[in-house]
Amino acid sequence: MRRKGSNIDWHAVKSRGGITMKLTEHIQIARKSVGLLFSLSKAHTICMILASFIGAVLPYVPIYFSARLLDRLYEGSGVGELALYVLLTVGIVFLLSLARAYLDSRRRMAATEMYRSEDWKYSEKTMQMAFESIEDREVALLRDRIQRETRVGYNIYRLFSSLEGITGHVTKIGMSLWLTASLLFLKTISLSAKAALAAGLALTILCKIITTKRVEELSDRFYGECVNRNMLRGKFQQYVDDYHSGKDIRIYGMAEGLSAYSMSINRAYCEAEHRKNMGQARASLANVIMSRALQFGVYLLLLSAALGGGVSVGSIARYVSCVMLLLEAASGLASSLQTALVNQKYMKRYFSYFDIPNHMYQGSLTVEKRDDNDYNVEFRDVSFRYPHTREYVLRHVNLKFKVGEKLAVVGMNGSGKTTFIKLMCRLYDPTEGEILLNGVNIKKYDYDEYMSIFSVVFQDFRLFSFTLGQNVAAGTVYDEARAGQCLVQAGFGERLAAMDKGLDTYLYKDCDKDGVEISGGEAQKIALARALYKDAPFVILDEPTAALDPVSEYEVFSRFNGIAKDKTAVYISHRLASCRFCDKIAVFDQGQIVQTGSHGELLAQKGGRYYELWHAQAQYYE
Ligand code: ADP
């Protein structure tokens, strides 16, 4: 099921594990999965397969040589020959064990790297996704679900364990069949006994398939039921653990309510898990009883055949051991295949996340680098609605702005100002109409090139817990003098001078105990410095003074023209007084530009939206 306009398989997000798959899909997912294992870590996968192979061969070495030894002993062979068999048994086992230990340690070393790089894949994917997908709740739910499923052992871990199991069990089956093939040709064992042996084997496998299926079904249902509950709990814990929430929790006495809520989620989770565990224990017990009974029957059958004569003592020991191992391996293989089969559904969901396409049309034109910053932008009859919504947020927006112009975008909250900027920066493409840069549709430009001409301070900008300098430069290697200069320009100069470690001061305490806590206004100044450091031809400030005190606000405004110099600047605010200094003002109202002009021109239009807003706000500024 695919929702209209959606990139992802919604069923994959919501299903309680019950994804149905055709054979061709199984083959396709299996191929992709093996490809994924090798791409994550070739060394880990190869070491795992080899170690599993050797581990499976190991028990057969003493079985084979002990049988030979017994026969030779029975035949009265000399000490030399007997010693040779003992030496061979011990020597081969020693060498194989050594090889296995080496492979296991190599594998363990590769495992950490592999699991970490697998974990980082989610972050990489997030960075490559179209912005539209990041804001999509379906995508967030899907990511959360597969991350949780991976954490509880599905996806990658199961992929490895089933591949390991299949390799080991197939090897054991091959070895057992090889060492017991002669049993089938023994005349002393009747045809009916051979048929009973085959039936016992088939029954053991069937029993294992049924119980594994039941165990997997119960897990599947349990984890499916837990998706929402787990996500809720995760978000909940995130909120409580974040020290920023600490103030609200204390002031509003939220601790008791939060604990009660958390306990109720935990209780429901534990009850569901208990039901699952009990169901699985019952299924496993039935399997243990059934398979042990069968093994006992096979044992008796072999012994009675041996008593009939025609079989050497060594062969009896070998047959008995190998047939027992064969039974175990056959049921193990059935279980590994079953586990792999169930995991296929999880892998389908896993790949559905990593395969979410980026539908943003990627052009190839380079953006001309102009020393004169001669860029101009035109919105031509642009309308837009967000994905999965019906309401248009922008309607028939037409706007041109000249190079070096200071444009102000004003309007009430929710009138579409930020959306207008998101379209200009190609975080979304218009639903209708087009946006042109120097007369060319912006879709035709190379995406990264196009992005390089914008510096934006969004309302909901985020700084990270690295050093001040790294935040300003948005990178680890930077020009210190320029970073400092940008901070001064953004009005952060005094605070910077008071910092002992200057640009090397960590923001917040996440990465460094001496990190500084900054106020909303200070954070906004740092974000502004970051925009200046990028030195892009377009500077866009979305409500940049919302968290600033009046003095700082005045500072930013009075410096703004100087800061922006010959750049094209777009300035968004719902505070009209802040925008008077701009050359041109576009007034947004319910997604439409209802007026454009200078402050003087707009104020002269009595009864206009600008006039109305101005007088509504004037009392705060007079
Ligand atoms: P402004 O910047 O003028 O306050 P916005 O452009 O942020 O307004 O929002 C305009 C409208 O678009 C609002 O009604 C808002 O709820 C809606 N909106 C904003 N972002 C999204 C989104 N990601 N998905 C759906 N609707 C959105």
Image (cartoon, rainbow, N blue to C red):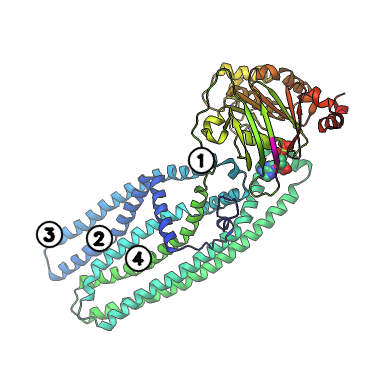
Tag in front: 1 or 4: 1
Residue 330, relative to residue 194: is it above or below? above
Tag in front: 2 or 1: 1
Apparent side of residue 291 relative to residue 171 in the rendered image (left or right): right
Residue 117 point in image, percent of width and height? 46, 42
Q: Residue 517, can we see it? A: no
Residue 493 point in image, percent of width and height? 67, 17
Tag in front: 2 or 3: 2
Q: Residues within 10 Å of mark 3 (few under 14, many from 20)?
A: few
Q: Does the magenta stretch include residue 393?
A: yes
State which tag comes first along the sequence, 4 or 3: 3
State which tag comes first along the sequence, 1 or 3: 3
Instruction: Tell me the amino acid under the disc marked 4.
Output: Ala
Apparent side of residue 149 relative to residue 392 in the rendered image (left or right): left
User: For the residue labelled by badge 4, is the local secondary structure a helix, a strand or a loop?
Assistant: helix
User: For the residue labelled by badge 1, is the local secondary structure a helix, a strand or a loop?
Assistant: helix
State which tag comes first along the sequence, 2 or 3: 2
Q: Residues within 10 Å of mark 1 (few under 14, many from 20)?
A: few
Find the distance from the CA under tag 4 to the CA under tag 3: 35 Å
Give the numbered dot on residue 513. Answer: none
Give the numbered dot on residue 329. Answer: 4
Q: Look at the image and give the residue range highlighted in magenta.
A: 391-397
Find the distance from the CA under tag 1 to the CA under tag 3: 64 Å
At 73% across and 39% down in the image, what residue appears? 591
Residue at numbered disc 1: 124
State which tag comes first along the sequence, 1 or 4: 1
Find the distance from the CA under tag 1 to the CA under tag 4: 40 Å
At 73% across and 22% down in the image, what residue appears? 582
Give the numbered dot on residue 80. Answer: 3
Instruction: Tell me the amino acid under the disc marked 2.
Output: Val
Residue at numbered disc 2: 61
